[in-house]
Image (spheres, grey):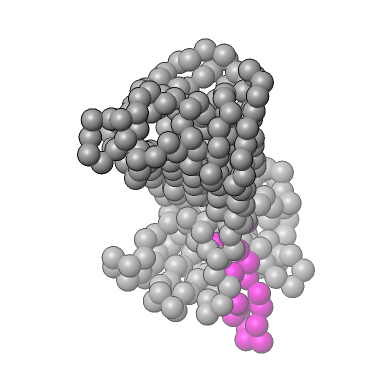
Amino acid sequence: MRCLISTFFLCSLLAGSSAEPVDSMLMEIGHEAPRFVAVNVRAESSDWSLLWNYTDSANYTEARFKMRSTGYDNDDYLYTSDFTVSRVVKGRTVSSQRFQAHHEGKAVGLRVQWFEGLKTLAVGDKQYLQTEEYGEWFQAPKPDSRIVLRRFKPSEVQWAEAESVEYENSGPSRFGSCEELVDYLRRSSDSLEGIWEYMDRNLPEGRVRLGGMYSLALVRDGECYRIIYVDGAGDYYGRLWKPLQDKGCLKPTIFQNHFDLEWINAKRTHRYMSDTWAEVEQGVILSLNFPLVKSQLRFRKREL
C-alpha cells in the first residue's frame, strides 16, 4: 500500500511572554482530506488549546484547556482541568461543550483521532470521552485547513505530534468531463476502448466486500489501457470516488487478450500490482481476477 505519512514534532520548551496567543502549526491538510489523522499533545494545562479545521482566525474548531484546581478529591488524580470544545464560524461560537479532564501531574494529555468516519477523543490520563458525548464540533479535518497548537500563557509542551495517512492516489484522467470521454470513445477504433459496466461477481462470502456496481472506461495510454472510474461506487465508499478518477490499468502480456492488472481498491487504501490479472472474452466481457483473495469481477461492454 502506498501511503504518505507526515509527522510534526514540538518537543522542546515553548514559552511565550506576550499577552498575544502563540500559534504553532502541526499539520496542513491538502486538497483532499486524509484517510487517517491522529493528533497527540501533552502540555502543562495552565492555558492552551488545539485547533483543527482552521482556515482563518474566524473559522475553526478549538479544544481549550485551563487548570481549574489541584488536590482533586480522588485517590487517582491530583489535578483537574476544564476542557471546552467550541466551533467558531465567521468569528462567532456556534456550538460548545464543556468537560473535565483529571490527571495525576501538571501536564494533561489530549489525543484526537479520525479514521474513515470513526472518531476517538481521549483527555487527561487515558480518559476517553464516549462517542455519544461528541457534538457537531467533532468533525474530521477538512481539505485546505490546518491543525494548530495555541498557547495563551507560558507553558511547557512535552509532546506535540500530528500524523496522517493519505488515500491511494487516484487523480483525474486527461478528460475534462464525462461527455468528453464518451465522445472520444465513440470515435475510437480500438475494440478494447469503451465503457464497461458491472455484470457479475464471484467473491468469498464474508471475506471480500463489493465496492460497487461500477461502470468503468478503458482508454489506451501508450502500451497500456487506463481504467477510469465513471460511476457506481457503493454508498459507503461513494464519497471517495469522483467520475474520471484513475482506478487502475491493464498491461498487455504475451498472451492474446490477457493483461496484468493494477487496481485501486474501493477504500483507496491499496493498489494491487501483483498476482492480479484481467482477460477479455469474446471482445465483450472483461474479467478482473484477484487470486490471492479468490475473487473475480466481470464487466460487459456497453453500446455507445
Question: Where, quadrant-wise, is the N terminus in this rendering?
Answer: bottom right
For image coordinates 54% across by 70% down, the residue present is 272
Residue, far right: 222
Q: Nearer the viewer, residue 300 or 113?
A: 113
Looking at the image, is 294 positioned above or below residue 297? below
Q: Which residues are magenta?
A: 246-264
Choose top left, top right, bottom left or bottom right for residue 129.
Answer: top left
Q: Nearer the viewer, residue 206 or 117?
A: 117
The mark tally for this picture is 0
Identify which residue is drawn at 46% across, 31% down.
45
Nearer-the-camera pick, 290 or 230: 290
**Residue 155, x across and y down, in percent:** 55, 32
Query: Is residue 149 rendered to the left or right of residue 136?
Result: right
Indicate whether residue 260 is drawn in magenta: yes
**163 drawn magenta:** no
Q: Quadrant of residue 202?
A: bottom left
Residue 194: x and y in percent read 62, 59
In this rendering, would 112 be left or right of 252? left
